[in-house]
Each structure stands twice: as C-alpha cells, then as structure tokens.
Image (cartoon, rainbow, N blue to C red):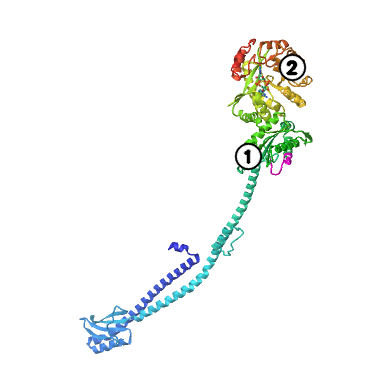
Amino acid sequence: MRAWLNDLPIPVKLWIFNVLTALIAGVVSAVLLILIVWRVEYGEAQRDAEIKAAIIAENALPALQFRDNRTADEILAGLARDGAVLDARIVEANGQVFARFTPPDDSGQRDVSEDTLQVAVPMSAGGERLATLEVISDTTTVSDQIVTYIAALGLATAVALIVGSFIVVRLQRAITDPLAELTHLMGEVSGSRDLSRRARVPNRDELGQLSDSFNRMIDQIDQRNTALGLELAERLRAEERLEHLAHHDPVTGLPNRHFFRKRTGDLTRGKALAEGSMALLFVDLDNFKYINDTFGHDCGDQLLVAVAERLLACVRAHDMVVRFGGDEFVVLLDRIGDSAQAQRLGEKLLETIVRPFDLADACFYVTCSIGVAVAPEHAANFDELLRKSDAAMYVAKAAGKNAVRLWEPSISDESSARFMLELDLRKALAHGELAMHYQPIVALDTGRIAGMEALMRWHHPTRGFVSPAEFIPIAEDTGLILELGEWAMREAFSQAAQWNARFGPLFVAVNVSGRQFRDREFASKAESIARASGLARDMSELEVTESIIMGHTEEAVHLLEDLSARGFALALDDFGTGYSSLSYLKRFPLDKLKIDRSFVKDLPDDLEDAAIAEAIVGLARTLSMRVVAEGIETEAQAQVLRELGCQYGQGYFFSKPLAAELMAAFIAENHGQRMAEPGLGTSCAASCA
Ligand SMILES: Nc1nc2c(ncn2[C@@H]2O[C@@H]3COP(=O)(O)O[C@H]4[C@@H](O)[C@H](n5cnc6c(=O)[nH]c(N)nc65)O[C@@H]4COP(=O)(O)O[C@H]3[C@H]2O)c(=O)[nH]1
C-alpha cells in the first residue's frame, strides 16, 4: 500500500489524502450526529410515551378502583388520537388484563422489539399497587427521521467531498505546480547541462526557498564548473608545457632524445622502417666544448640555436632534427632515396655548419663530424640505425673531424666497442670501478722517493683493466674528464696528505687534460679541492702536456699563472714530443719539465737522445726548472740521467704505478733508504697493473 502510494504523483497523493481526511471527518461527524439525533428522538418519544401513560394511568385509576371496565376502556381509547400507540392495557397484579386498547387497523401481532417502544406505569392507591399500565408505541417515525437524517448527511458529505475535491485540487496546485516546474527544470538542467536556466517560483514559502536554494546550487555548480574549466584548461596548458619541456630541448626548441625515442617507437609500430627507406645523420660539433668553456654558456647556447636553425633549413618539413645531447644533433630523414643521397645531405649539413657564425659581436668557426646510416640497408631497427650512425660519426671524428662518414661494415667493431666503452665509463665512477694508482718519482742523486705521479686506473667489470690511453681520450671527447679529473685530484691530494702526515714531505702530481684546462673554473676548483684535502700546496703538482698549452698560448699563460699564484707546482709532461717552441717555454710559470720516455728509452747508447736529454736539462736549469726523466727502466738509464744533472727519475726501474696500499708499503720501505738497486720496485711491479 505504502509502496503503491509512493509511486503515485504528488497531486494524486494530496488529493487522496484530502478526500480521505474529509471523508473520515464527514463520516465521524455524521455518525456522531446520528447517534445524538437518535438518542434525542428516542428520548423524546420515550418521555412522551411515559407522560401520556402517566396521565392515562391517573385518569384510569378510579375506574380501576371501582372495577369499571368500560370507563377504563374509554380512557384507554383516548390513546387512539396518538397514532403511534400500538397497544395499551391495564394489567392487574394477578396478571389479568383489566382494560385494553388496540388501534383498529393493527392486528396486535407486531413484535415489540421491532421499531417499538414499551412503557410501563404502575397504578397504585393507598400505597398499594393495583395494576400496571403498559403502552407499546410505534417508533417507525423516529427511525424514518433518522434515515432521512442519514440520507441528508450522506448527500451533504458527498456534495462537500465533490466541492472540496474541486477546491483542494485547485488549491494544491499552488504547491504542486512549483514542484512540477522545479522537477521539470532539474530534469532539463541535468539532461541538457544548460546551467543558464533558473527556477522562477514567486512563492515566499518553503517552495520559494527550495527554488532559491536550487538556483543557488545551480549558481555554485556553474561557478565551480567555470573554475574547474579554467583549472582544467590551465592544467592542460601545464601538461602541454610539461609535455613540450619533456620532449623538447629548452635551448634550441628542437625535439630531444625522449621525443626521438617516442617518435621512432611510433614509426616502428607503424612499420615505417620496414616499408620505406630512412636515413639517420648523427651530427657532433667538433669544437663546441672549447667555445662553451672559453666564451661562456650564453655564447654556447646561441651557437647551438644557430646550428639548429641551419640544420632545419637544410631538411624537408617531414624530416626531424633532434638535439640529442650537449653538442650532438640527430637528423632523421624520411623516404630518402638511397645511402648516396643521405651522404650528400650529410655533406650539405657539414657545409652549412662550417660557414662562420656571427655571434656576440664575434665570428665563430665550428666544424662537425657526421655519421650516416640508412635503413633498411644498414639497420633493421632504429636502435641499430642510431648505433651505426653514431659509430660512423666516431670514425669521422677519430679520422680528424670535420667529415661525413657513411656507415660500412668495417666501421662496426672498433667504433661500437668505443661506444660501449663510453657508456660504461659514464657509470664507472658511480660503480666504484675507478681507482688512483701512484708511481714513485725518485730523487736521482739520493735515490729517495720525492713524490709520485697519480695515474687513473679503470677496472672494467667484464673487460678487466682498461688502459688510460684508451679511456682518457673518450673521457675527454665526452666531457666526462671534468668529473673524473676532479675526482682524481680529490683522491690523490687527500691520499698524499695522509702520506705527508705519516712519512714527511712527498709531492703528488696529477694529470690535467686539455678539456679541464679549458674550463674557466678549473683553477678555483683545483684550489678548493687541494685546500679541502689538507695537503700543503707546494706538495700539490699539476701536470700538463705541451700540446695543451701550446695550442692556446694566451689563455694557457693566464691559467698557468693563476694556478701558480694559487700555490700549485706545474710540470710540463711528455716534454720534447710536441711542437714546443723553446722560446715559448720561458713565458710559462713551470716548475718541472718531464723528459718524455721516448728520449730515455735508448739511453745510454743513443747519443742523439743523450744529447737531447742533456739539452733539456740545460734548458731547464737556465729557466730555473727541475727535470724529471720518465720511463727509466734500467740502472744505466738512471745513471746517465743522474750524470746529466737530471734531478728526478720515474720508471719501472724504480716501480710500476702502485695501488695506494702498495704505495704506502713502498714509501715505508724506501723512505730514507737509498735506491740504487731495483728491489722493491720490481717486486711491487709484479702485483700492480
Ligand atoms: N713503458 C713504460 N711506461 C712507463 C714507465 N714508467 C711509467 N710509465 C707509464 O707512463 C705513463 C706516464 O703517464 P703520462 O705520461 O702522464 O700519461 C698518462 C696520462 O696522460 C694519462 N692519464 C693517466 N691517468 C690520468 C689522469 O688521472 N688524468 C689524466 N688527465 N690523464 C691521465 O694516461 C697516460 C697513460 O697512463 P699510464 O698507462 O698509466 O702510463 C703511465 C705510466 O704507467 C716505464 O718505465 N716504461
């Protein structure tokens, strides 16, 4: 019932409630009214009958006393005037009827319980009850009257209900119409999502409040939606920015390595590589690092932007130019004819890059090395294509830079090995695969250890020992040498500081690569590392090669002076091998010259080498420099160099480079002891790299 009611529309529900209420009220009032009328009518009929019976009884009493039946009957017959009396009799105490009246048309057979009223009045004289007057009256008129009442009330109730329903239906529209409007509006708003719609209910009652609340709610949703829309748009913009940043290089605006990976992934899925020919050109600027370090990053950035513009100008719209790393660009050419065409484009790129760049009021010349690989001719997938173009680029660079090289099978092994080595080297420091070893430098006149050269060692997890001659050039090409060089200084200076504290003064010489030398911050970095190590500055030495300083004379003089002013001793390594102009030498604030081992190797027999060694020692003496002879492997070499006046010797004759613990043992054993015989050095050499 309840569920049925719940499902009905509100107007119908209200109508039912109202009608029911009115009906119940009508019925209850009618019943009450009828009951009251019934009681009143019957009460009156009863009283009437009793009064009449009492009068008759009083009048008939003398007739009873005188036993005058006729008079008693006459008196009773007077009741005939009252049409309602059905029977009247005087019944004596012994039960005998003394007198009786029955209307002439009544059979007297009527059941007294059916619409009749019975009254009994005692007839007494002198305190003695002589008889009882019994009167039975017809109450049909009372019943009829009540039926009439009921009918009238029923009619009145029905009319009231009809009229009431009509009025109620009209009145309840004041409630149901606004409700229906609100419901309809809500349906429309939620259906069409048109938040401009508003409810217009003028009522000031709860419906008016409901309508206001609804409008406020829509306002809030509208505002929230607007705010959400703005936020969403902002978030989308931020996401787009992030997406752009994640996939583009902020300096040149070109797609970056991630974008390249994503794009090539898409192309692979789209089978672009399998279905058409593509070429990948790996472009690496040759001398960009120098420009960046010397003229600053702003200038470097401008150059990269200009290079990017030139590269873009050379390719078609559907080709892709990517900034792959610091000075590396990758050009992906779609639907390229053949490898010759790809190579021609490589040459075009090279020509465009080598044209001078006018930047920051200066003219810059940049060259680049370009490796070209073509798919499907050279590679089955993009990784391979990238690897091979990179390998070709390495070969172009190794062959003297400023060249385009198309990949060919002969390139693969050597260059990809180098490429793998580069990847491994990037992780070597973090993985603890690098260590510093130390080779003693001995005072030739006393044979006492005076110091040591720090040499980097890489123990590769699978290849084993990798020579610095192999990995240092890679570190230089990739710029990794900056990190490795700082680490080397940190290690060597702090290790030497400990040995100085334990064994007394011992200098340590650390190699500085050309790449580090071009770093403008190098002097201050070196100083802070030396200071942090606690090593006395006159015990910290830096070794540079001829080629480094001769290439950039002015800057070199400036940097060497700066380093010297900061207290570093400076040694010129591999002296005699380069294109040294001896006249330049005096311009550099050098403390030591290291005679290259190529001049020591054939001593004492090669007179020419002996003459060169003597000249170097003499030159050094003139310039107040000390001389270290490298590569001494025999006592005879040590002897002749000692005689030539060379102060220090370094070489396998004394010791091979040693790991720190062995070096400590070497110093402990050697310190203060003359080293005429190759004893400890040889024994240590066996256990060292
Ligand atoms: N045949 C022979 N060789 C001897 C003898 N005595 C020493 N040597 C080797 O000669 C090289 C001397 O180092 P370098 O000229 O500075 O030449 C070094 C240096 O230019 C570079 N290098 C090594 N460690 C570092 C470093 O930490 N930083 C930089 N930038 N370069 C380093 O790698 C080069 C090669 O280093 P190593 O292989 O350690 O080779 C070392 C050393 O082991 C000898 O009696 N006979």
Quadrant of the frame with the N terminus: bottom left
Q: Is residue 488 visible?
A: yes
Where's residue 35, x and y in %?
37, 74
Q: Is residue 497 left or right of residue 141?
A: right
Q: Which residue is mark 1?
A: 261
Image quadrant of residue 250?
top right
Q: Which residues are magenta?
A: 309-320
Where's residue 260, x and y in %?
65, 40
Query: In the rendered structure, does residue 317 fall within the stretch colored magenta?
Result: yes
Local crowd at mark 2 within 10 Å, few (<14), some, or many (≥20)?
some
Quadrant of the frame with the C terminus: top right
Image quadrant of residue 409?
top right
Up/down of 309 relative to 26, above or below: above
Query: In the rendered structure, does residue 407 fall within the stretch colored magenta?
Result: no
Residue type highlighted by circle 2: Met
- Residues 682 and 168: in front is 682
Q: Which residue is mark 2?
A: 625
Q: Which mark is residue 343?
A: none
User: Element under label 1?
Assistant: helix
Q: Quadrant of ligand 1?
A: top right
Q: Please give the name of the residue rendered at 76% of the width and 34% of the height, measured from the top-left corner.
A: 354
Q: Is mark 2 within 8 Å of ligand 1?
A: no
Up/down of 282 relative to 543, above or below: below
Q: Is residue 302 visible?
A: no
Image quadrant of residue 142?
bottom left
Residue type highlighted by circle 1: Arg
Q: Please give the name of the residue rendered at 48% of the width and 71% of the height, measured from the top-left corner.
A: 165
